[in-house]
Amino acid sequence: MNGTLSVSGLARLYPMSTTAVQKHVAVLEEAGLVHLTRRGRQQLVQTEIDTIAEAHAMLAEFERLWRGRLDRIGDVLAEPAGGDRP
Amino acid sequence: MTVIAVDRDPVALTLTIVAEFDARAERVWQVWADPRQLERWWGPPTYPATVVDHDLTAGGRVTYYMTGPDGEKLHGWWQIISVDPPRSLEFEDGCGPPNEELPTYSVGVRLIETPEKTTMTLTCRFASIADMEQLLATGKEEGMRLAVGQIDGILATAIGS
């Protein structure tokens, strides 16, 4: 699923009742994975896939930074003198 | 050093890295608590850090600058939230002069000693995606850009040889 769909439209795609789909959507919204809006009587579900992918990529950049630091900490700790400069 | 677990949570905007070191917790703590040791790992080799102030107490500050290959100085600071030697440390990591309105992110360090090793759990928390973007763009985290360059260099050498 990508983009925007109504809850009733989603229910037609899966062998589930509208109520069951609504429960699943509520869990996804709680997790920040979808965004809910209302249009008249219809409830629309919009995925936040782009935002999540962007956040994931940026976290990967910070992971790279910190892995470098952890490697260097390992080097400092590996020295017999206990990390002091000779 | 071995990284034993990484968790990137793009919804909560947190990064957790768990690493193991063959050393006692007291020894691992020193790499944070001793400014001379901190200088040796905070910045990448081409951007070594010089620690100016180092007050590792709740409410205290650590200030430093990193010197780039062209002599440019990048300033940064930590605002200490809590310290419990040799078990835990929490601080806000910021860049630029401390009173400027640039985003910060919080860093939590937790050390757990087992008979043979010390486990360090590092947790980075970001307030928003916009903050993360700005942190990456301001150049404070030059270690990342540099790391990419270093990897490219290594790959080029490997392919060329």
Image (tube, rainbow, N blue to C red):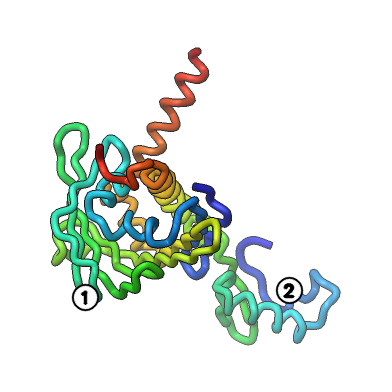
Which residue lies under the disc numbered 2? A9
Q: What residue appears at the point 25 percent right and 75 percent down from the top-left corner?
A: B58
In the rendered image, the residue lying farthest to the top is B161
Give the percent coordinates (x, y) of residue A4. Answer: 62, 67
**Above-or-below relation of A65 to A1:** above
Q: Nearer the viewer, residue B97 or A43?
A: B97
Residue B32 falls left or right of residue B74: right
In the rendered image, the residue lying farthest to the right is A15
What's under tag 2, amino acid-wise? Answer: Gly
Which residue lies under the disc numbered 1? B59
Give the percent coordinates (x, y) of residue A80. Answer: 38, 41
Give the percent coordinates (x, y) of residue A52. Answer: 53, 61
Under tag 2, what secondary structure?
Answer: helix
Question: Which corner quadrant holds the N terminus of chain A?
Answer: bottom right
Q: What residue appears at the point 25 percent right and 61 percent down from the top-left corner?
A: B94
Q: Nearer the viewer, residue A72 or B65?
A: A72
Give the percent coordinates (x, y) of residue B121. Answer: 48, 63
Q: Nearer the viewer, residue B149 or B25?
A: B25
Q: What residue appears at the point 42 percent right and 43 percent down from the top-left corner?
A: A78
What label sits on residue A32 in the rendered view?
none
Query: Which chain contains the residue that carries disc 2?
Result: A
Q: Quadrant of residue B84?
A: bottom left
Q: Is residue A12 visible?
A: yes
Query: Which chain contains the residue that carries disc 1?
Result: B
Q: Quadrant of residue B66?
A: top left
Residue B58 falls left or right of residue A30: left
